[in-house]
Amino acid sequence: MYRVLYRKYRPRFFADVIGQPQVTDTLKNELKSNRLAHAYLFTGSRGTGKTTCSKILSKAVNCLNPVDGDPCGECEICKGIDEGTILDVVEIDAASNNGVDDIRTLREEAVFTPAVAKYRVYIIDEVHMLSIGAFNALLKTLEEPPAHVIFILATTEVHKLPATILSRCQRFDFHRIAPVDIAERLKSVCNSEGVEIDDNAALLLAGLADGAMRDALSLLDQCISRTEHITEEIVRQTAGLADKSHLFEITAAIRTKDSATAIEIIDRLYRDSKDMARLCDELTSHFRDLMLIKTVKQPRDLMVMSDEDYNKAYEQAMAMPFEEVVDAIGILQSSKEKMLRGANRRIEMEMTTVRLCTPMAKQSVSPEIESRVANIEKTVINLEARPTLSENKPKRLAPDSKANRPSDEKMERLRGKAVPMAEWPEVIEEMRKYSKTVAASFEGSTAYISEKYVLVDSANSICFDLLRNNEKLRSKMRDVIKSVTGMDYWLGRYSYPDEEQADDALSQLKNDLKSAGIPVDDNK
């Protein structure tokens, strides 16, 4: 039976593992010095060697004739593990065996000594899929396993593991494999298979794999099924990619604002059954290359492409403003999200191209910003001319103080010109970060903007007492209003109580207290 390439060429020794020296060197040193941990955690993106290293480690700890930390690969234990006949090495898929009962069964089996090998090794793949109950059942055994048991946990999503599990394991992080290393490995495999592969094709396969050796070998397997001479064009046809020249042509049309030509290219690609979402991804990556050329001193090391394509990309990058390149990346990423949410991919790609080719259409502003700008414009229209910097600013006083209070005539004029302040709820929310008590006192209040005043209207007098007696708090609110609206305002009340009536009521209260024989200080 035919074996796919990623299984046929799976590394059998630590030295064969590509691009993970921080893992393989450490494990070999531990094996040579016999300083084995009871639990290992391998984490990293897909196809980087986690399961492969787990299998090599399980052979190395049980090998009858280890060689410099590597398994010999020839003894009956090594061959038995490769063939799956050694029952002391158990590989568990946590995605389908994630219940408490599965872990309890494992825990009960772990107490028995190995039948053939030196250690019982449990490899739990995708361990983050275990349920909370299963994790709890595993904790005690994982912390203090029998001397003959070694756990190897592998996951692509380490953030989903409980801290109690992480603290009980020796952690190894697998990095994405460099495109150059993947390309060299692909050429070695092709040489073994009697297949010819161009350098550009190997680099393209490495770039498509995104750091995963398994993905690269799977794509190579498909290409070999088509031809024994793999070129860049064969890779593009197999993976359903647009020819690189089309990306340069679309970018050139965007640079010259030629939307008609860009749409014609997209139409031709669509009729050739090119996936529009994939084209959007490729175009995003192309603009990312242009961004790197304009920002990084040595961008060549970060880009997977031929020298000829790099020279073309360099010319395009130098001919486009940096802001235009960055804006294009943002617009393309937004377009990809819409495609994934169900939008017609062809129409979305065409609309995106038109936006990229039309200068006025490039300004992609979120609805929240548009709303805020509209409110500010509305406010500015109703404001009188603000004092220049040369004018003396009035002393900052309490909102209710007589010196800062407008006259009755001016107050009527302010109320007549006041417009509702749409940002007031946002101001209260920002104040909540500073003080929940203050924010609560302003609940249910409204505010109006008139000239250089923010006039607050509230039935709760506590909020005004807080502002009147706390200069720091008053200053904080003015700062918050400025950060939200972008303008500096004085604080005021939308309406004021009649002070003369208030003074009469206070005098009457003092007289009543004196009549009752209660001492009263007239100065207070």
Image: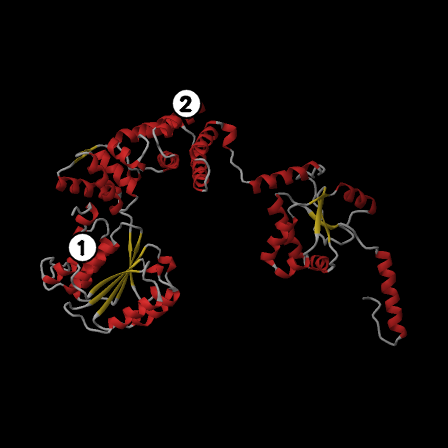
Q: Is residue 388 left or right of 280 when viewed as pictured?
A: right
Q: Which one is in front, 116 or 373?
A: 116
Residue depth check, mark 1 versus mark 2: number of the one nearer the observer: 2
Q: Which one is in front, 24 or 82?
A: 82
- Seen as rendered, the residue at the extreme front is 1
Q: Height in image: 190 above or below 39? A: above
Q: Residue at x 85, y 64 (%)?
A: 506
Q: Is residue 192 left or right of 147 when viewed as pictured?
A: left
Q: Please, what is the three-letter code of the amino acid marked with disc 1?
A: Phe
What residue is disc 2 on? 261
Identify the element where label 1 is drawn. Answer: helix
Q: Quadrant of residue 412?
A: top right
What residue is disc 1 on? 14
* Label 2 crowd (10 A; few <14 / some 14-19 / many >=20): some
Q: Is residue 480 left or right of 46 when viewed as pictured?
A: right
Q: Please, what is the three-letter code of the amino acid marked with disc 2?
A: Thr
Q: Residue at x 30, y 31 (%)?
A: 310
Residue 395 in view in this figure: no
